[in-house]
Image (cartoon, rainbow, N blue to C red):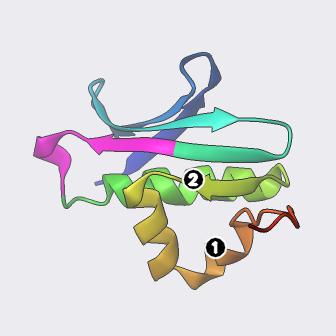
Amino acid sequence: MSVEVIDVPEAKRYEARIEGESKIAGVAEYIRTTELVAFVHTEVSPEYEGRGVGSALARTALDEARAANLRVLATCPFFAGWIARHPEYQDLLYQSRSRVSD
């Protein structure tokens, strides 16, 4: 089974489809600025869970963020957990530059 992931900027999300099927298998919603992309929600249809759809969404989205020189803010629990388990993507994580303290 092959998963195809495409960016749909007008919908502000990545969409995953199983090769040969028209139904959307999963989505990763984001908010993008000139400096970073915040992944806010990821959802995989129940019939596609456990088949690599979420991983394909994360890997494609993060590879594209890297190529665009964007930092990543993983507010979505799925993306945060996925990045924690894949250290090769941890360098993309956004770090606040504020020096303000309480």
Q: Residue furthest front?
A: 102
Task: Report the residue at 57% width, 53% height from top.
Answer: 60
Residue ID for mark 2: 60
49 up-or-down from 28: above or below: below
Q: Is residue 27 left or right of residue 101?
A: left
Dot 2 falls on a residue whose secondary structure is: helix
Q: Nearer the viewer, residue 5 or 39?
A: 39
Name the mark on residue 28.
none
Which stretch appears magenta? 40-49
In this picture, residue 9 sits left or right of residue 70: left
Q: Which mark is residue 89?
A: 1
Label 1: which secondary element: helix
Q: What's the residue at 20%, 39% (across, down)? A: 45
**The C terminus lies in quadrant:** bottom right
Residue 63, position as x, y percentages in the image: 67, 58
- Say whether residue 74 is left or right of residue 54: right
Amino acid found under the numbered disc labelled 2: Thr
Between 48 and 102, the residue placed more toward the observer is: 102
